[in-house]
Amino acid sequence: MAVPGAWTAALDGATVRQRTRRRTPGGNPRRIVLAFLLVLGLVTAVAIGAAWPANAAVTTYYVAATGCADTNPGTDPAAPLCHIQAAANKALQPGNVVQVAGGSYPELVTPKASGSAGSPIVFTAAPNAAVTVGAGLANAFKVSARNWISIQGFTVSGTTSYGIYVTSGSSNVTLSGNSVDHTKDAGVYVSGGSNNAVSGNHVSYAGVVSGNTSPRQGIKLSGVSGGAVSSNTADHNSDAGIQLASGTTGITVTSNEAFGNARTLLPGQSRAAPGIDVRGSGNSVVGNYSHDNEDSGVQDYSGGNDALIANNLLTGNGDHGIDLSNVQRSKAVENTVYRNCTSGINVEGSTASGNAVWNNVAVDNAVFPTYGGLSCNRKQGNIAVSDAGVGTTTVDHNNTWLTTSGTQYYWAAKLTLAGFRAASGGQAAHDDYYDPRWVGGGDFHLTAASPAIGLADPSAPGYVGTDFSGSARDAAPDSGAFEYAGVGSSTTTSSSTTTTAAPTTSTVAPTTTVPPTTTPPTTVAPTTTAAPTTTAAPTTTTSPPPPGNLVGNPGFEVDTKSWSTGGSTSGAGVTLSRIVGGHSGGFAAQLFNPSAAAANCTLNDSPNWVAVTSAGTYTASIWVRPAVAGETFTLRIREYAAPGGSAGSPVSTTVTLSDPATWQQVTVNFTVTAATAGSNLDLGAYTPSAPANSVCFTADDVSITLG
């Protein structure tokens, strides 16, 4: 979340340590613009940076693991307190800040007072500090009957219950930029209260600890009214990555990535863990990337009535892309659903009624022979309607396609499109059955020849006027999660089928990718960094990117296609645009922070340029120009495992950029071993604390080469 400008200075430059998310094929992870959330009334005053009175005093309490004493006042960074709780006991006024230096703090922290609107009490890791809290205790943080609290930038690992626990009706609590792993219960649990925000966290391996046999969710909200779950990564948890439990309503789940979640991470469990699980009514799941989970990408289960499931990318899941099971009046619209084990969009159950399936693209679902040893023919069809859904579900304006033998539609029986229309009494009247002609290679953007262009109906139930990337849809909108952007939107307009980019082997039983629980990650931030000497380049040059460049849009000469600002500070609204004048050629990319507070600005490849690796050393390079002298800049490569493989450690290079008038080259090397070949590489370039209302940095001539 953006830090309110009136108390930014009190953090002494501290920013939320954003957890960079795994790459999202074909779009910007910051998919739904702030305006959309405002319309829904779900963004708290903290999230939009409401200022607190100018005459209010700001007191910061400093905590450090060394050179400290709990008898100190704590307001002098040179004489810090030893324990976070000691600072919490003093932070009793709205606007107070507790800033924690690097180190391990085996304590359970409970805020003792509430903040106020625009003046939360803030618990934050110090700038660039790795702070681990709560190991071996029930929780790292427990917020009980407190309001307007912000907890940001901490690592929580190995708690004996929930990692971060918000309970007893606490409201307007913001949890952002934290890394939570290997907790015995849910990683983040919010019980009761209203208008809470869980944003920009990385939550993994919940329940995957020695001796535990009970499935646990990564992020769980229960009995919560209003708020947002946004820009989180939830992976390899032993139950749903994100769950909205019974009694939870008015929540927007947006811009998250959920993958690898599986009950079978635990002994004796069976397949049942979805990426996103909705069991409360009146919630919205919009613009998420949920893939390679053990069960469905998005599960809207009994009790989850009146849900909006829109603009999501759902691929490679072990059951459905979207499962509407025993719900009423839920809407699945504008989603892209590809190669899930069983039916792509599924409506079922004895109490199903009044649901809608409109404006989607569904391709090659239910064509796997097996997934994790389980047959994929238990539910068939790109779109399937059964049980009480037959006769009560509306279906229209969808683009479906199969590249191999399979079932096109299911309406109480296996059917072709024509058969579906006849059996359903005229449903799917405007559906088409053609290759959607995606860009391919894991990019789900449409090419100019796609039949999905102009297919959608803007009067569809639950229609959303922006796409997965946050771009406005046309007056004649396109079906699926991605709106065609015109010339330059695609790399090819070939009529050849491009929908086989993800072979069946790309979906595997999650148990094959689980690292030993005896070596849990303590942070998602790169654990190895290097800061080589950078060489200033001339301010003008005509040198092209290196030969053999794997980056398809290195110089931003036509557009910013396949680049995004994913991983930037949630709610800051960081933008990516082309400007005239580059390191070479006529244009460059520029990131801008329009918010009233300092923000992390990240340029990410989207989708990954290196989708399938070979063994060898990859060299990534970027030419960058800072907005201000002395700006810190990082270029990072992350590896994500191929089926059956394990990911290597992320590697980054961090430098200080000295001259806003000079282009500087930053490089980083990453070696892929034979054991992990076939993986994919995620490239990110970022500055952690760009000034408010300012250019973050300018970038050009990005390259990735092998050898």
Image (spheres, rainbow, N blue to C red):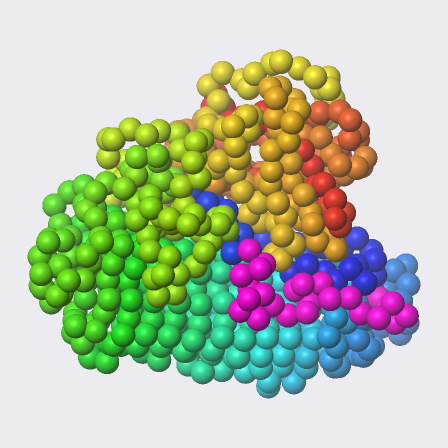
Q: Position of residue 341 (x, y in %)?
A: 23, 55
Q: Position of residue 124 (x, y in %)?
A: 72, 63
Q: Position of residue 557 (x, y in %)?
A: 55, 25
Quadrant housing the N terminus: bottom right
Residue 329 quadrant: bottom left
Seen from the viewer's position, the closer of residues 15 and 392 is 392
The residue lying at 73 percent from left, 66 percent from top is 50
* Extreme residue toward the front, this view: 475
Asked if residue 603 shows in the view, the reply is yes
**Is 320 left or right of 377, judged from the image as shown?**
right
Seen from the viewer's position, the closer of residues 663 and 391 is 391
The residue lying at 78 percent from left, 60 percent from top is 5
**Is 103 left or right of 339, judged from the image as shown?**
right
Q: Is 84 rendered above or below residue 456?
A: below
The residue lying at 44 percent from left, 68 percent from top is 284
Asked if residue 291 shows in the view, the reply is no
